Amino acid sequence: MKTAVVFYSYDGNCAFVAEHIKTLMNADLVRLRTKDEKRRGRVGGFLAACAMVFTKKRPVLKPVDFDPAAYDLIVIGSPVWAASPAPPVRAFLSVAGITRKKLALYVCHAGGMGSALGKFAAMLPCNEIVAERDFINPAKNADDTKRQLADWVKTLEEKAG
């Protein structure tokens, strides 16, 4: 089964998860990056993130080489910003042309997921969501996250295979 992991990571948590899925599933990685990768302080970053979510702003992304037709399973990961998937992921999904695919979705957060997974799935109509998962501070809880990922990947392989 040919698998891609598409993700955006602001603070490294979604990257941590994506890299482990890549290893476990021998998947291709597609990292989304914004053209404006300005790092803001904790408070400034939080306020900017919330503003982007509430105004539904889609940041400009750096180009990526990704053809959804080339994959049997696409795993998509996002941080949770204001109980929603991060705007860079929303920007990617608006142009990626992902339809009629098997998908797995994951979000990373510090304890406030809200309805992020439901909003995420709603952005991907005409696809089969085979699994969803949230990870709380995955890089800080590395050993626990690796165990969770091993179990989740088994589920993915069963459901998507």
Image (cartoon, rainbow, N blue to C red):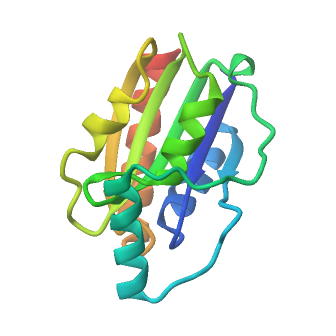
Query: Is residue 111 toward the left or the right of residue 10 in the image?
Result: left
* Residue 64 visible in the picture: yes
- Residue 27 lies, with reference to residue 122, above or below; the image says below
Furthest residue toward front = 55
Residue 101 spot, x, y in % from top left? 54, 15
- Residue 118 lies, with reference to residue 10, above or below; the image says above
Query: Is residue 69 toward the left or the right of residue 138 in the image?
Result: right
Q: Residue at x 35, y 63 (%)?
A: 144
Quarter of the image containing the N terminus? Answer: top right
Residue 113 spot, x, y in % from top left? 23, 55
Q: Residue at x 41, y 60 (%)?
A: 52
- Residue 110 lies, with reference to residue 146, above or below; the image says below
Residue 44 spot, x, y in % from top left? 41, 84
Q: Residue at x 51, y 73 (%)?
A: 11
Foreground residue among 20 and 79? 79
Foreground residue among 85 and 140? 85
- Residue 75 lies, with reference to residue 160, above or below; the image says below
Foreground residue among 76 and 33? 33
Quarter residue 99 falls in: top right
Query: Is residue 30 toward the left or the right of residue 99 in the image?
Result: right
* Residue 24 visible in the picture: no
User: How many callouts does the rendering have?
Assistant: 0
Q: Residue at x 32, y 63 (%)?
A: 109
Residue 148 spot, x, y in % from top left? 36, 51
